[in-house]
Image: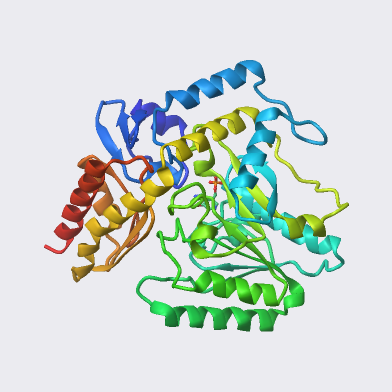
């Protein structure tokens, strides 16, 4: 198995020609996964943040099978439609913050970013402001890997060597909350005002941002940041795109982090927990104002698998589980428990910060030892994510109290070990 993996597979984010022995994951249940050797792991990251309802839900498999037997797929282009995607669109509008009345389906986050930015630019074109093409983003942001999404991303190493980037993206400072206090908000808002002044509002279509930076290290913004940003953008007629690929459907304890931070975005990008990853599925929620601006314009955009009936059926059942099992509340309670268990690490001289928002936790070390810590945790049965100096945790919302305590114990042991 290992040799075939190394022979035939090129893994995302791997060094070409330098394969390492894979961890071949075989099955999962709740917040745990097992590899083919039978070793159990607590899934402290739920893969890539997606698995809200936990692994091994036979109910979702049954829904997928039933839908596949009825209709596996038919296009949603032009005037074709299917019942699961109609029902899912209605459900999303019902759950979403007020004023987001339409849904465009995708297969994931990058496609969501492409869609939202194309909508924002086309809306300007449609209303006689075709030069309004600039998109404001932030350093540390992750919005995906395709052309526009990569350009919107604010992590430079993810763009190196890929040639010319899409133009008209401007990156502002990372909104780093926990240790910087309210003064940080003022500074970021002044920077935003100045950027708008320099570029000219008449050239800016939208600002895009993750409510809490995810790949950038589970970084919540400083207090008051989002309402402050929204007020400035509104004053200048600039649209707000919230990339909730990670945060939507419970991870911060709300259906949408927009609610938690008190903002009313014009577009929301979602994916991941929409289907908990059982099948690829994403959705962009579109504000009424954007729809009004686009009135009468043809949207020449769409991915083949737009509105996939199997994805939509599974997403509906997944949202039912989140609601039925009270997983939003669980994310808050268990997120607090996880953070409380790890916060004592912040007193160590070699730990810079421990922060969190719901079930998104970030630990920044003073050294680039996060990959080493994460490797040791994995050997002790806990999967965490680590790059350079940052360790990130984002377990399924169904993780149990004892599992949280084990994660805290294992991570703490290996972080403390660094200093000895
Ligand atoms: N936006 C955000 C905030 C993300 O976290 C991700 C994926 N981690 C993406 C976009 C890209 O999503 P995908 O990999 O599904 O294209």
Of residues 398 and 208, which is closer to you in this image?
398
Q: In which quarter of the view is residue 379 placed?
A: top left
Residue 155 shows in this picture: no
Q: Residue at x 48, y 71 (%)?
A: 174
Q: Position of residue 312 (x, y in %)?
A: 61, 33
Q: Position of residue 39 (x, y in %)?
A: 24, 30
Q: Residue at x 20, y 42 (%)?
A: 380
**Relative to 235, is 282 above or below?**
above
- Is 102 situated left or right of 125 in this image? left
Location of the C terminus (image quadrant): bottom left
Colour theme: rainbow
- Is 20 situated left or right of 237 in this image? left
Q: In which quarter of the view is residue 161 placed?
A: bottom right
- Is 173 situated left or right of 296 in this image? left
Residue 257 shows in this picture: yes
Q: Position of residue 64 (x, y in %)?
A: 55, 24
**Relative to 98, is 227 above or below?**
below
Location of the N terminus (image quadrant): top left
Q: Position of residue 99 (x, y in %)?
A: 68, 56
**Relative to 233, is 218 above or below?**
above
Q: In which quarter of the view is residue 124 placed?
A: bottom right
Q: Residue at x 24, y 53 (%)?
A: 373
Of residues 233 and 131, which is closer to you in this image?
233
Of residues 78 and 159, which is closer to you in this image?
78
């Amino acid at each position: 198995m290992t040799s075939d993996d190394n022979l035939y597979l090129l893994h995302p984010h791997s060094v070409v020609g330098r394969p390492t022995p894979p961890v071949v994951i075989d099955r999962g249940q709740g917040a745990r996964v097992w590899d083919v050797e039978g070793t159990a792991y607590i899934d402290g990251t739920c893969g890539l943040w997606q698995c809200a309802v936990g692994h091994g839900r036979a109910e979702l498999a049954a829904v997928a099978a039933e839908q596949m037997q009825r209709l596996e797929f038919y296009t949603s282009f032009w005037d074709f439609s299917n019942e699961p995607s109609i029902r899912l669109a209605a459900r999303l509008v019902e759950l979403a913050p007020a004023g987001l009345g339409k849904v465009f389906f995708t297969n994931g986050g990058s496609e969501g970013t492409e869609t939202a930015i194309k909508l924002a630019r086309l809306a300007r074109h449609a209303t006689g402001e075709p030069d309004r093409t600039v998109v404001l983003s932030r350093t540390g942001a992750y919005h995906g890997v395709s052309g526009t999404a990569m350009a919107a991303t604010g992590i430079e190493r993810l763009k190196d060597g890929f040639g010319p980037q899409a133009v008209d993206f401007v990156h502002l400072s990372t909104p780093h909350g926990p240790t910087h206090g309210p003064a940080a908000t003022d500074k970021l808002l002044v920077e935003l005002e100045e950027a708008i002044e320099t570029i000219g509002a008449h050239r800016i279509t939208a600002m895009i941002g993750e409510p809490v930076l995810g790949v950038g290290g589970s970084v919540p913004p400083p207090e008051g940041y989002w309402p402050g940003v929204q007020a400035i953008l509104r004053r200048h007629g600039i649209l707000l795109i919230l990339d909730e690929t990670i945060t939507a459907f419970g991870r911060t304890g709300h259906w949408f982090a927009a609610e938690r931070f008190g903002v009313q975005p014009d577009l929301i990008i979602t994916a991941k927990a929409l289907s908990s990853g059982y099948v690829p599925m994403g959705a962009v929620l579109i504000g009424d104002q954007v729809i009004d601006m686009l009135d009468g314009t043809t949207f020449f955009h769409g991915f083949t698998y737009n509105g996939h009936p199997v994805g939509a059926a599974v997403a509906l059942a997944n949202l039912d589980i989140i609601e039925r099992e009270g997983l939003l509340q669980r994310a808050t309670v268990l997120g607090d428990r996880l953070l409380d268990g790890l916060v004592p690490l912040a007193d160590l001289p070699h730990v810079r910060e421990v922060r969190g928002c719901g079930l998104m936790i970030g630990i920044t070390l003073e050294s680039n030892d996060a990959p080493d810590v994460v490797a040791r945790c994995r050997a002790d049965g806990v999967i965490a994510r680590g790059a350079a100096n940052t360790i990130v945790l984002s377990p399924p919302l169904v993780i149990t109290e004892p599992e949280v305590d084990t994660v805290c114990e294992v991570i703490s042991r290996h972080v403390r070990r660094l200093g000895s």
